[in-house]
Image: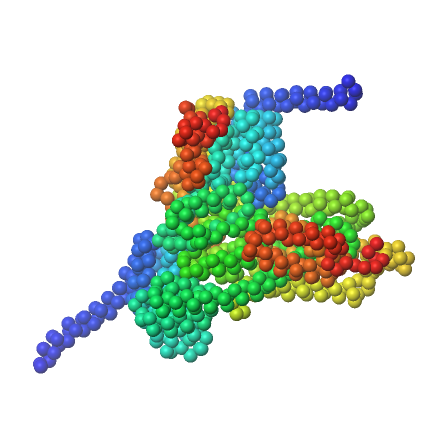
Amino acid sequence: MKLGSMIRTGLVAAGLLAGAATSAFAQSDTIKVGILHSLSGTMAISETTLKDVMLMLIEQQNKKGGLLGKKLEAVVVDPASNWPLFAEKARELLQKDKVAAVFGCWTSVSRKSVLPVFEELNGILFYPVQYEGQESQRNVFYTGAAPNQQAIPAVDYLMSKEGGDVKRWVLAGTDYVYPRTTNKILEAYLKQKGVAQADIMINYTPFGHSDWQSIVADIKKFGSAGKKTAVVSTINGDANVPFYKELGNQGIKAKDIPVVAFSVGEEELAGIDTKPLVGHLAAWNYFESVKNPANEAFIKEWQAFKKNPKAVTNDPMEAHVIGFNMWVEAVKKVGTTDPDKVIAGIIGIKVPNLTGGTSEMLANHHITKPVLIGEIEANGQFDVVWKTPGLVPGAAWSPILDDSKNLIANWTPPINCGNYDDVAKKCIGKTK
Amino acid sequence: MSQKRFLAWLLPLLATVFMAGSALSADLATLVTNLVTGGYSERDVAITALAASGEERAAPILQALSAGDLYVRTADKIVVIGKGSGKQVALIDAITGKDAGTAAEDDLDKVKVNNRLRGTIDAAVGSLTLMSPNPKVRRQAADSLFTRRDASALAALDPAIAAEKDSAIKRAMTEARAAIVLTTPETTPAQKLAAIALVRDRGDRDAMAVLQIAAQATEGDVKAAALAGAETVRNTLAAWSMAQNVWYGISLGSVLLLAAIGLAITFGTMGVINMAHGEMVMLGAYTTFVVQQVLRSAAPALNEFSVIIALPLAFLVSGAIGVLIERSIIRFLYGRALDTLLATWGLSLVLQQGVRSIFGPTNREVSSPSWMSGSFKVGQLDVTYGRLWIIVFALLVFVALLALLRRTPLGLYMRAVTQNRPMAAAVGIRTPQVDALTFGLGSGIAGLAGVALSQIDNVSPNLGQGYIIDSFMVVVFGGVGNLFGTLVGATALGIVNKFLEPYAGAVLGKILVLVFIILFIQRRPRGLFALKGRSVE
């Protein structure tokens, strides 16, 4: 063995020893919780607040005496809006830090990139963002909305008399997996409802698209066919601000052509003058403006934690609150943080959400949520104009699309499968 | 008739008159109470009832409801109209129209309204305000009647048309009347045919919508005439949409020009592959944000001019940082293209994260002054003021830069140094100083672009990233080292992009433009306007 490689081996060994020592120490003293959100790069705009809300929840839990008699310890990593780095950081959290659960990811592509890691190392991921569905993985809990908890009810609302009796539809989205899948589901759903192909316009734009002049003009043109028209927007992130500015500039008012957005929340509106946008809609499972004691207490705590009386709250934050509380309850129930036991034990756990109901973790790893439609107000908040009468259970697989209409997800015995063909009675993917 | 009998006759009569009077104001109170109780469908009925009551207070109450200014005071359940927002709202009693003091927003219950109700209110207020003394209000009333087409408004329209003096407003009212006639089943075919001609001559998208609705609901001659009318309108609009594409193309071109023109100096004439160029743009945008913040607290009256005040400051901030970068990093790397590329790219990440740490990762709101918002119509073309000013500004910057390079000693030195450094040094030009100033100039112009872009894009740490690729594309396409090439390149790319977008979609359009440029560079590696002669070598 040469000197160089000897040194190297020595270093590796020392590193391993140190790692073992810290994890042994950690096991006796604290329970580690991983936070996997981008703190730099393009997604920092949305994900930074989620890291902060997790830190607040962990701090609160520790004040209540921690969990299983131990303190919780947050391990924050920065995947920097870089999809492959998400997988590396997830591996680091699970292997090196030995975290009991991970709360993280925003974009679907980042979630897809960490899936194999969580499967291989048997970790637990809580994913807090509304997404395209068509997925259920044993190690992931989806606390954001599935399409049937956001997109479909929003379209139903617009079709109703209350929502304006819409007959023509523009499906506008950013060009990536979430809008493409959501629009595929919506298109099939609209056709099922008797909307003709000629009354559906689908438009995709690149990430960060900033010149919306011709697309807004196209929407205007499409809307002048004499039928009530609405835009269903899955436009993501930064591109929304210039889109709404252009709508305002070209004089498209919400009462003429309403835009219902699935990715615009309080946080996104903070960057624009909302006066021209009054009346445009958003569909979520939570709005900051919802009046109830639990929500008011949460907002107060959040503003105190951020030391900013203007800090806003939004839907993915609520999803983390629900997910974290469910995990805490599940750990208490099974008396350990062992992933297999927690994954089995969390199903059926019920915790209160912030809109006055009680959300339940379902066997398909999705949760029950209310669906709210809010109109943008001049102060950048949403005014709830419609909500579902009860809670909607999240569906992992869309019954509307042909290739998933027979599929269900159920992670309880005897099925124990994320994509179980209910007609052929067999599991297409892995059982465990 | 004795006096007694007469009195006996009169008294009940008087009583009825008196009671009718009090019933009227009681009526308004009930109407308003109906307005603020119940759900959206009850409110819809109440709006129509209030509008039909003929009460003078109906219009202001409904307008306040539509604007979200109608509240119920929690303490005494009185319906009030609130003005302004924030801690204290000034109140007016909705029924009497008298001052009702002030209240905190927390003590008021807002009367909720949704899009359907706003539509109902529009139609209702439209017929109520047709006789308003304010011409703008009358115009608005006519326009909203055209889009809402409420059959009950016909009764109000006829006297309004007869009384109207302003010919443009009269025309708008006649068109609104025609639209209503067309979409009401009760009118005769002859009336409808006359109305079709009127609506057709209006010639815009709203007119086309009305004609198409009419065509669906009618038969025979009327249907044929409506379809023919819609076809005429469609043809006019198609011609205008060409003009619209050109205009949008020029507008996109002006944005590309602004973003690229600074790079045309640093990359084009100095040859520095400056990956941090986009961040100079971003710094300019953040300067605008800071200026607005300072003005908002120090001198709110100047807020309208904040963008103009920000211009020199943005130039100085970005320019100074440019000089600093040149002196501390780039001057050690001249002639080492790959090293410069890596160093400036790293620098761009440092600047982005620096801004993110100082201002936070979320977007910052930069407001548009009133002279930069809204739009006006040229024929059937919507021209937005913001875009128009940006085009004007881009051209001004271009001309100023050209003049600087051609007509001033500094420009002469710059050209001399970039064309032949040893010879310039030999005749006594201090080349390091000129290098620093040239790089500073390019960066400063990027800062100016940032001020303009803050009006149309997000002010976020990622602002610059979106423009860096486009900027290089424009400079390379136009011809490195040639300002006119940059101008022509930016405009051409803008227009090509906007013509492709409607047919190919935004994503494919962008790809096609890139493919086109790659092929073009294969044919003409030096771009549209290649520099000739010794300076190229």
* Residue B430 rendering spot, x and y as whole percentages: 86, 56
B402 with respect to A325 (left or right): right
Q: Relative to A180, is A57 above or below? A: above
Q: Nearer the viewer, residue B75 or B484?
A: B484
Question: Vertical placement of A386 versus B386: above or below?
Answer: above
**Whole-percent x and y of residue A429?**
49, 29
How many discs appear?
A: 0
Residue at 59 percent of width and 59 percent of height:
B499
Observer-nearest of A369 and A191: A191
Image quadrant in which you'd find residue B156:
bottom left
The reply to whether residue B376 is visible in this rendering is no
Residue at the spot 60% in from the left edge and 46% down from the top edge: B360
Q: Quadrant of the rendered structure where residue B163 is?
A: bottom left
Relative to B418, is B249 on the left or the right? left
Residue at the (31%, 66%) spot, across then down: B185
Q: Which residue lies most toward the top here?
A: A1
